[in-house]
Image (cartoon, helix red, strand yellow):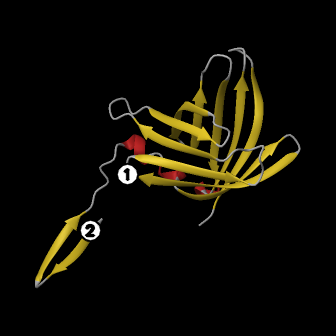
Amino acid sequence: MRLNNMVGDHRKEHVVTDTRPDALRRLDPLTGRWAVTVHIGDATMRGQVSFEWQEGLFLVARSTTEHAVVPDSVLMIGVDDTTEACAVLYTDSRGVHRIYRMSVADGVWRQWRDAPGFAQRFTGTFADGGDTINAAWEKCFDGTTWEHDFDMTYRRQG
């Protein structure tokens, strides 16, 4: 991208480049505001989440919901500058705080946590040109048997 800047009678041209690593640029499809629908059993709950870049190197997500069953949360997403491994620091209104691994590649957003006694994994698939994400969480208590936890749908809001 080129930006022109008038300084007196002299014209300066500035070239703006995105020097972020590819691992960070892969997170760009998440940025913006999303309406979220959470399906737990027969119940449907609604909320909002916004993903915004902080300092150009961390993607911060803040979510709120209309129902106490689904806690409000904050995620700070970053990438290791050597390995390009992506990590999520998660905290919510219940006082829960966790660390997840994460990836966004080939139209699929994944998060996972392999903690003893309570492992989790999330898979979200982009649809509608990137304006919808259809997602599901799974959980595992014994290190072997995975079970469906709940579904989520994200719809981009402008």
Q: Can residue 75 be seen in this view?
A: yes
Q: Is residue 15 above or below residue 135?
A: below
- Return the residue at label 2: 2
Label count reads 2
Taking 20 as reference, is 26 left or right?
right
Q: Quadrant of the N terminus?
A: bottom left
Looking at the rendered structure, the secondary structure element under dot 1 is loop
Q: Residue at x 51, y 36 (%)?
A: 88
Q: Residue lying farthest front?
A: 95
Amino acid on which the number 1 mark rests in the picture: Gly
Circle on res. 56: 1
Q: Quadrant of residue 74?
A: top right
Q: Where is residue 123 in the image (x, y as percent from the top left)?
A: 64, 37
Q: How crowded is mark 1: few (under 14 residues within 10 Å), some or many (20 or more)?
A: few
Judge whether residue 107 can be spotted in this image: no
Foreground residue among 119 and 24? 119
